[in-house]
Image (cartoon, grey):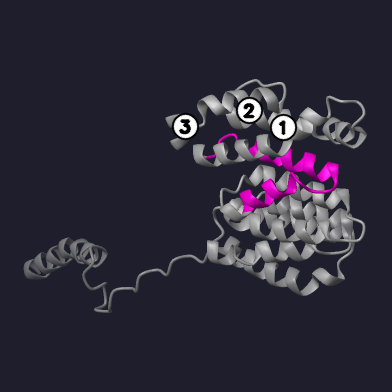
Amino acid sequence: MLKQSALTLVLAVAAPFAALAGQDGGNPPGGGQPAPPTAPAQNTKDADAAAYLKDVKAQMDKQADVDAKIAIKKLIGIWKDKEVADETKKPIPDLLERYARADKTAVAIDAIEGLGELGAVAGAKPVLGILDRALKAKEPSVDVYGSCLRALKKLADPKPGTVKALEDLLKHRMDDVAGKAADAMSGYKEAPGKIRRELLEELIKGTEGLFSAAKDPKNGAQVRRWNIIQGNVVIALNALSGQAFKNPEEARKWFNDHKKDKSWDS
């Protein structure tokens, strides 16, 4: 009887330790193998985004304007969502460009503005393509090319091709296009010094002769062009230089004295 009680006591004391051994990484009670590690949870938001992009690509040509505008807004939201993988986001610039090239102006404007939200690397090239197409139209749409130039102002893309495109547009036959190109240049006020210096010099070159000619009321075309673009030109001159000029003539005098400053090398 005494032996039986002693055995019962030993078993009672040993049982908790056996259970703890299983919890600490040993074999679980019953001699089975350790449970496999739990698989990482799937990123549901990323999967949902991928499915949505696929659906948009399939349906966009059939969408009503209101649905297209909703889709554009959602595409921008996905682009900015840090929980969505970069690989998943890759189709978004192309999708927005397709919307922007549609013949529906309201949809195109939203899409162009959306491209302006993507950053220079992803947004500048498609915007330049849309802008070129818009300006080559028989009757260029001010809403479309204006949206493109506002997007380029926001993107402030430092690549030589984009900078050159804006410089060339200062000479455009349409006064309004030249003025909006100058406005886009003002978006480069935080750009590297070398880019700001180049834009400033080209802006001065492209407008100082016009400003001089517009002083004579007899030069009707020059007076009209200067009146249209002067506001944006002065804003851009000041944004690029950090000064407070009233016209290209003042900017030229200052630039000649400061174009070799080391501050432009930043």
Q: Is residue 242 visible?
A: no
Secondary element at image label 3: loop
Q: Which comes sooner in the sequence, label 3 or label 2?
A: 2
Q: Is residue 50 magenta?
A: no
- Which segment did they paint magenta? 162-191
The residue lying toward the viewer, choosing from 45 and 154, is: 154
Query: What residue sits 60% from the left and 61% below the top?
Result: 45
Q: Residues within 10 Å of mark 1 (few under 14, many from 20)?
A: some
Query: What residue sits 50% from the left and 40% below the top?
Result: 194
Q: Which residue is mark 2?
A: 252
Amino acid type, residue under disc 2 in the picture: Arg
Q: Which residue is mark 1?
A: 208
Q: Residues within 10 Å of mark 3 (few under 14, many from 20)?
A: few
Secondary element at image label 1: helix
Magenta-drawn stretch, dominant element (helix, strand or loop): helix
Q: CA distance from mark 3 to mark 2?
A: 13 Å
Name the image quarter holding residue 230. Answer: top right
Marks 2 and 1 in Cβ contact (< 8 Å): yes
Q: Is residue 60 visible?
A: yes
Query: What residue sits 59% from the left and 34% below the top?
Result: 189
Image quadrant where one finds the N terminus: bottom left
* x and y percentages locating residue 57 in the rendered image: 74, 71
Query: What residue sits 67% from the left and 40% below the top?
Result: 185
The residue lying toward the viewer, choosing from 96 and 202, is: 202
Q: CA distance from mark 1 to mark 3?
A: 20 Å
Amino acid type, residue under disc 1 in the picture: Glu
Q: What label does residue 260 carry, if any? A: 3
Name the image quarter holding residue 92. Answer: bottom right
Marks 1 and 3 in Cβ contact (< 8 Å): no
